Image (cartoon, rainbow, N blue to C red):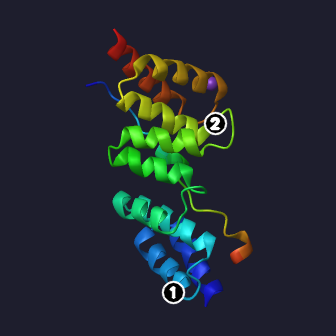
C-alpha cells in the first residue's frame, strides 16, 4: 500500500483567543 | 474566572497538553455554555486527543455544523464516513474556490473514496497553488494516487 500523508490535520488549530485574554 | 480559564486554554494549547486544555475549556462552558470560542476550543482539543466520535457528537449537539465545517468533515474522515465527509464540505462551503484546508481535506477524502482521477486533478491544483513546508509530503501523496491509477 503506497505511503499517504494526512496533511489536513496540520490545519487543525485553536481559534484566536486574543479578545479573551 | 473566564479570563483565567482562557489563559490556561492558551497555555496548555500552546504546549499541546490538550487533556489539560479541555479541562480549562470545561470550566468556561460551566458558566458560559454558549461561548462560541470555548465550544470551538473544545472541539479542537477533543480532536487533538483523537476523540473524533466525541468531537463529532459535540459539534452536532451544539449546532456548530455551519461554523465548524472543516472540523466536522475531518471527524467524519477519521470515522471512515467518507461520503458524509464529502457532503459536509460540499454543502457547508461558503467560498469557491474552497479555502486551502477544505481543499486539502476534500482531496484526501477523494483518495479514500478511490476517486483517483478527481484526486489527481485536485492534488495538481493544490501543488500548483501552494508553497508551504508540506510540498514533499504532497508529492508523495500524488505518487500514491498515480500508483493507484497505473
Ligand atoms: K507549489
State which quarter of the image contains the C terminus of chain B.
top left
**Label of residue B65 in the image:** none
Please state, as top left, top right, bottom left or bottom right, where the N terminus of chain B lies in the image: bottom right
* Residue B133 visible: no
User: Please, which chain is the residue tagged with disc 1 on?
Assistant: B
Residue designated by label 1: B30
Residues at marks 2 and 1, CA–CA distance in whole angstroms: 35 Å
- Residue B98 shows which numbered tag? 2
Residue B5 against residue B53 in the figure, above or below? below
- Residue sitting at the far left: A1
- Residue at horizontal 74%, vertical 73%? A19
**Is disc 2 in the same subunit as disc 1?**
yes
A14 over B149 or under it: above or below: below
> Quarter-wise, where is residue A18 in the image?
bottom right
Mark 2 chain: B
Question: Which residue is painted at 39% across and 38% down in the image?
Answer: B83
The residue shown at (33%, 49%) is: B79
In percent of width and height, residue B60 lies at 46, 62
Near mark 2 (Cα within 10 A), the count class, few <14, some 14-19 or many ≥20, is: some
Amino acid at each position: 500500500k503506497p505511503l499517504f500523508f494526512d496533511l489536513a490535520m496540520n490545519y487543525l488549530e485553536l481559534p484566536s483567543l486574543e479578545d479573551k485574554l | 474566572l473566564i479570563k483565567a480559564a482562557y489563559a490556561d486554554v492558551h497555555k496548555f494549547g500552546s504546549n499541546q497538553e490538550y487533556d489539560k486544555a479541555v479541562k480549562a475549556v470545561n470550566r468556561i462552558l460551566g458558566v458560559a455554555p454558549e461561548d462560541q470560542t470555548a465550544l470551538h476550543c473544545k472541539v479542537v482539543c477533543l480532536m487533538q486527543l483523537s476523540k473524533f466520535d466525541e468531537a463529532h457528537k459535540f459539534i452536532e449537539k451544539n449546532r456548530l455544523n455551519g461554523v465548524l465545517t472543516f472540523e466536522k468533515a475531518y471527524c467524519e474522515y477519521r470515522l471512515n464516513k467518507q461520503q458524509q465527509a464529502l457532503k459536509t464540505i460540499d454543502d457547508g462551503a461558503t467560498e469557491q474556490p474552497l479555502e486551502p484546508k477544505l481543499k486539502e481535506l476534500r482531496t484526501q477524502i477523494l483518495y479514500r473514496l478511490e476517486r483517483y482521477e478527481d484526486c489527481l486533478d485536485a492534488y495538481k491544483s493544490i501543488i500548483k497553488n501552494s508553497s508551504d513546508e508540506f510540498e514533499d509530503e504532497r508529492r508523495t501523496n500524488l505518487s500514491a494516487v498515480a500508483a493507484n491509477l497505473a
